[in-house]
Amino acid sequence: MKFDVITLFPNMIKDACSHSMLSRALNTGIISINTINPRDYTLDKHKKVDDTPYGGGAGMVLMCQPYFDAFDSIQKDEHTEVFLLSPQGQKFEQTTACELSEKKHIILICGHYEGFDERIKIYTKAKEISIGDFVLTGGELPALCIIDAVSRNIEGFLGKIESAKKDSFSDGLLEHPQYTKPREFRGLNVPEILFSGNHSKIDEWRRRQQLLVTARKRPDLIAKFKKNCNNSKDLKLLNEVLFPKTEYDRNVD
Ligand SMILES: C[S@@+](CC[C@H](N)C(=O)[O-])C[C@H]1O[C@@H](n2cnc3c(N)ncnc32)[C@H](O)[C@@H]1O
């Protein structure tokens, strides 16, 4: 997967990608990340990339020319996906990360200051993409979030691709709780079932926990899951989680 990032602050991208899994993926060639700085494409001697907004108002707006030329410098084909980072864009989610991990080439255009001259979006035919309903100073952190989340889903990025497939949101639910050694720490115990060696029981416990955790933390996701679910085992577990039996029910049963 090739990422081209158009940014006025290439070191923000390079530095952040020089650690941990992203750095390993770069070294093994699973991904490549190239930065293009619009400032290198300015035509005036002051390397100006922004100007005051027409119609007045605060802040500076990114100018067309350096961004058009930076964009034109990138080799593209019909499979290239172009995104413009913007708080006004379509929300980036885990499903987007999984879909994009199948692509070969992604261009991310980072804004700054007051944002882009509107014609940059039109010229590049970019889709606007947002990482949430809040406003950051620039598009570099959102671009890094996207690079990281997409890369996790590329075969070979993680030791086992199943790790990404079991992550929260992958099948619409949050992940179940995880535990590691020691078995007991300061009076806090790991659930007994995890030592049973009975893998089908452990799987069922984990699924129940997923449903429980999601119902508690993200009822919006549970509602969506319930609507789309056609797995009878999941639906039965969900029913048990949402409507646990009371003492009275048990006596009547
Ligand atoms: C200060 S913001 C500009 C916000 C713009 N004036 C507005 O209100 O829509 C500067 C740049 O940061 C990036 N940015 C800020 N928040 C973002 C978000 N939630 N998702 C994606 N990009 C964001 C965009 O590239 C944006 O052009």
Image (cartoon, grey):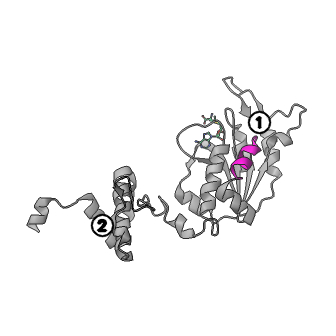
Marker disc for residue 237: 2
Amino acid type assigned to the residue bearing label 1 in the image? Met
Answer above or below: position of 160 versus 112. below
Q: Secondary structure at mark 2?
A: helix
Whether residue 148 sits left or right of residue 29 in the image: it is left
Q: Residue 143, how many percent across, how many down?
A: 65, 48
Numbered badge on residue 63: 1
Where does residue 217 sit, x and y in percent of width and height? 38, 50
User: Quarter containing ligand 1?
Assistant: top right
Q: Is mark 1 within 8 Å of ligand 1?
A: no
Residue found farthest to the front = 186
The tally of labels here is 2
Give the magenta part as a residue range: 7-18
Label 1: how many Cα within 10 Å (few below 14, some 14–19, many 20+): many
Q: Residue 9, labelled with which disc?
A: none
Q: Amino acid at mark 2?
A: Leu
Foreground: 75 or 24? 24
The image shows residue 171, relative to residue 5, as above or below, that is: below
Vertical placement of residue 248 versus 139, above or below: below
Which quarter of the figure has residue 10? top right
Quick one: SS at disc 1? loop
Can residue 223 be spotted in the picture? no
The answer to whether residue 118 is above or below residue 241 is above
Q: Is residue 76 left or right of residue 163?
A: right
Q: Residue at x 37, y 70 (%)?
A: 195
The residue under the point 71% across, 27% down is: 54
